Amino acid sequence: MKTKTTFFCQSCGAQYAKWMGQCQSCGEWNTIAEEVVQKEEKRAWKAESQGVRPINKPLKVSEIVLDAENRISSTDTELDHVLGGGIVLGSLVLLGGEPGIGKSTLMLQVALNMKQNVLYVSGEESQSQLKMRAERLHQKDSDCLLLTETNTQNIFRHITEIQPDVVIIDSIQTLHTDAIDASPGSISQIRETAGELLKFAKETATPVFLIGHITKDGQIAGPKILEHMVDVVLQFEGDRHHIYRILRSQKNRFGATSEIGIYEMQQTGLREVTNPSELLISQKDQALSGTVIAATLEGMRPLMIEVQALVSSAVYGTPQRSATGYNIKRLHMLLAVLEKRAGFKLAIKDVFLNIAGGIQVDDPAIDLSVIVAILSSNENIEISQNTCFAAEVGLAGEIRPVTRIEQRIAEAEKLGFEQIFISKFNKVAQKDFKIDIVTVSKVEEVYRKLFV
Ligand code: TYD
Ligand code: MG
């Protein structure tokens, strides 16, 4: 048989008949590579030949019964929450994240804890390494089966024999199928092996989890096609040097994508964090200048976050600006606002900004805390640890309203804050809350209220 080759963009998975310098689909340069494909039907998963009858048949809308039974619990409340209430039978879930962030730890932990019959297939670690991991997680006597294998034909042979309730693949980039000749991790292998697993998941109603590595710019390494194929895309994020990890859903055919799960990486595995606000605030008893608490929202969850700023005289010509966990462009913008609208001479100052806990915050409601933290450090005046902030700051120095303000205020009140600064344009009734609500409309007003 003649070998057939095709050209694939290694970034987006677009297919070409000949080589080109630039991908016409995603615009990337030098990403198109030749891969060997043999278009003959030699799929690893063929339901009929494996003796498993497809369980789905066409039905009218009226015939479809909605039963609560089509979800199973992963035993991990955060994961269940992010998935929209448990694992949907027959779903294909992609868990992406940077190397070393804890994807294998999370999935192994789930596999070991589940009461169902779980098959954990690793192409990355040997069985003894997996045993060591399991021991570290204090889970030695689980019924979960661990398999080291990368060939899908062999994996499906085991699956047919074991008949697992859940399959976990660590990772999709290590798999290869005999059906095509390309090397593991290439676009055509990823597409083909994921396709086989998708077919298996749908035909047998078995949930399948795929672990996928992520490139530096946050894409599931290799193909975006994977994101289109799967039902759910979960992203595991965090700073490797910090203990917090956030599980976010980027796509979910069975639930909302705004849900997040928060974990703490410990020596004995990942621990679910049920009250994150309390943990992210480092010292609540002692006020320090430059430290301010923001009432933010991560997904649907209110989260109190500590913002720290350090303003010092610039030693060299160009003042330094640095931001950890916050968009540096936005910091520049807020500094310009302070300079222009409120007359602060920050151009001769170095400004460092840090969000505690190593988390990345995109919620614009953190703006006001950033401004207050900078001013507090600049003036060397502490902000009471019983005060928190939630508002966006506009280019004109106006304090803008933010979404779900009641939820933020309620969280602040619950955690014992006595005062919250919000935008004048966020309409809330003080009588509904015990916490003192301070409304502001301009940066100057904030400055006057806090530092004069
Ligand atoms: P891992 O799950 O291997 O990451 P990934 O699969 O995403 O590449 O986790 C790697 C890190 O987690 C590693 O640096 C060690 C740490 N770790 C713990 O802190 N506690 C634990 O119980 C385990 C198993 C790992
Ligand atoms: Mg791993």
Image: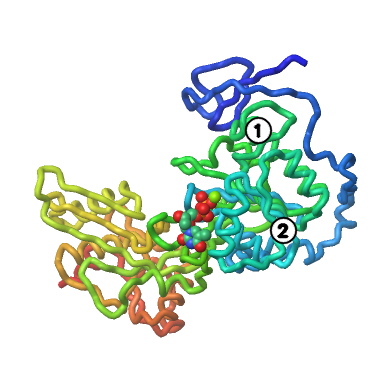
- Furthest residue in direction front, as rendered: 128
- For disc 1, the marked residue is 189
Q: Quadrant of the N terminus?
A: top right
Query: Residue 241's x, y, as percent?
Result: 38, 57
58 or 226, nearer to the observer? 226
Cα distance, mark 1 to mark 2?
24 Å
Q: Label 1: few (<14), some or many (≥20) within 10 Å?
A: many
Q: Is mark 1 within 8 Å of ligand 2?
A: no
- For disc 2, the marked residue is 118
416 relative to 244, above or below: below
377 or 93, nearer to the observer? 93
Please tell me which of labels 1 and 2 falls first in the chain: 2
The answer to whether residue 253 is left or right of residue 29 is: right
Query: Residue 173's x, y, as percent?
Result: 60, 39
Give residue 153's quadrant in the image: top right
Count of marks, rendered view:
2
The kind of residue tagged 2 is Val
At 15% from the left edge and 56% from the top edge, which residue is drawn? 343
Give residue 149's quadrant in the image: top right
61 or 25, nearer to the observer? 25
Query: Residue 388's x, y, as percent?
Result: 33, 72
Report helix, strand or loop for mark 2: strand
293 relative to 371, above or below: below
At 10% from the left edge and 43% from the top edge, which residue is drawn? 317
At 62% from the left edge and 42% from the top edge, which residue is drawn? 172
The kind of residue tagged 1 is Gln
Q: Quadrant of the C terminus?
A: bottom left
User: Does residue 425 appear in the picture of this structure?
Assistant: yes
